[in-house]
Every structure is written in structure tokens, then in C-alpha cells.
Amino acid sequence: MSTPSDMGAPSDRPTVVCVVGSPRPAGNTSYLVDVAIDEFTRRGARCEKILLSEYRIMPCEGHDDCADFAACPIDDDTSLVLDKVYSADAVLLASPVYYEDVSGQMKVFIDRNCHNYSHEVWLKARTVGLLAVAESTGLDETIDTLRRYVSFSSNGTLRPFVVTGKAAKMGDIAGDADTIAAVKKMVAAMMATVLARDAADDAAAARASQG
């Protein structure tokens, strides 16, 4: 269901989880995520690609007492997906533009973060990337939705990197050199952020051990 890359890598390498909201495994959005994964891996990260359409993620049922549940009572694959997303060093969220916003798969995934939010469980990611692909319009609205997700799920502490692209037909994005270059540049910036924070954490730990 998910596609890990370089799973035999040492455990101290940064982990990246890429959440894909497209129902088309070989669509333009998924293609750009694969470009990102190749670049993350080249730069030393361990990646996992999660195609939401391949998981059983049911819509939120809007329990008024959500905060009182130790775990979400809906029995599906959501907890498995969220455990991966919330424990990653970096997260990439990718969605095609459907009806001027994120895909249905991505929206249901976003809604199912409510239990974590109710319990003040935040993303551990040091950096987040947002990726959206449209035929023409709706890119701003889609990115805004993904930004709000990051803000609510990180307690407002993360500032995402963003790439958008346009493609009219399946496979068109593969010929868009500018968007592909932008994805690789975003990955470079995300990795630099992860490594810089790792270095800062190491320095702080060293100071604590000496004091």
C-alpha cells in the first residue's frame, strides 16, 4: 500500500513521509512526489509514499466527545497512516486540484486529524512541503487548505515550503522542467532545515551534558 524507499538505511537518517491525495497512482501529482522522493533519497533521507486511495480511511463522524476518547472509535486504517505522518522528520503533502480545492481523499484525511488535535498531539516534523497540481485554477485554494492543516496539526509552529504546477492531461507534468526543478529545490530546502535543526539539537544536548 505504501512504498518505502531505502528501507535498509541506517535509522539515524531523516525520515520523510509523502502523503498523496490523488486517486491516480500514476497521475501528475504522484509523478512529482516520485521526483521528490528520488531527491530526498539522494540527499540521505528514508522515504515512504502513502497513497491515501489505497487505504481505508473513513470520513470523520463528528463525535461531540472526541476529546474524551483515548483513541478514535472509527475502525479503519487512519491510525496507521497518522502514526507514520506524526512521527516523521519531514512531511510532504500532495494533492491534485479537484473542484477548486484538495481532493476528496485528502480532505477526509485532514478531517481525521481531529482526534490528535483534540488531544494536543502535534506533528514532530521539522519541516513540511506542500504540492498541488491543477489543470488551470484552484491552486491557491488548495494550498491554503493544506496550510491550514499544517497550522492546526503543528500548533502553528511550522512554515511550509510550497510548489504548484499545471497539467491538462495525465503525464503532462513530466515535460514541465520548471516545476520539476522547483520540486527538487524545495526538497533541498527541506533537507537543509532538517539537518540544521538536527545540528542545533546535537549542540544543545552537548551543552546539557557538560553543564
Image: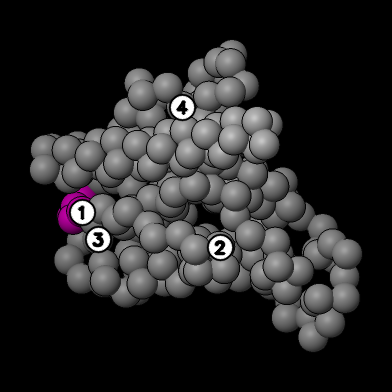
Q: Could you tell me if the residues under marks 4 and 1 are in contact, i.e. CB atoms within 8 Å?
A: no
Q: Earlier in the sequence, mark 4 or mark 1?
A: 4
What's the CA distance linking mark 2 and mark 4? 21 Å
Q: Is 67 left, or right, of 48 in this rendering?
A: right
* Residue that badge 4 annotates: 45
Q: Which numbered disc covers residue 154? A: 2
Within the image, what quadrant is residue 11 found in?
top right
Q: Could you tell me if the residues under marks 2 and 4 are in contact, i.e. CB atoms within 8 Å?
A: no
Front tag of 4 and 3 = 4
Tell me where residue 12 appears, x and y as whole percent: 58, 23
Q: Amino acid at mark 4?
A: Ala
Q: Is residue 141 above or below residue 34?
A: below
Tell me where residue 58 appears, x and y as whole percent: 68, 63
Q: Amino acid at mark 3?
A: Ala
Q: Amino acid at mark 1?
A: Gly
What's the CA distance linking mark 4 and mark 3? 28 Å
Tell me where residue 39 appears, x and y as whole percent: 32, 28
* Residue that badge 1 annotates: 165
What's the CA distance linking mark 1 and mark 2? 26 Å
| Numbered disc 3: secondary structure | strand
Q: Which numbered disc covers residue 72? A: none
Q: Who's the residue at 44% across and 49% down the image? A: 127
- In terms of depth relative to the viewer, which is nearer, 122 or 32? 122
Q: Earlier in the sequence, mark 3 or mark 1?
A: 3
Q: Is 131 left, or right, of 50 in this rendering?
A: left
**Residue bounds of the magenta highlight:** 165-169
**Quadrant housing the N terminus:** top right
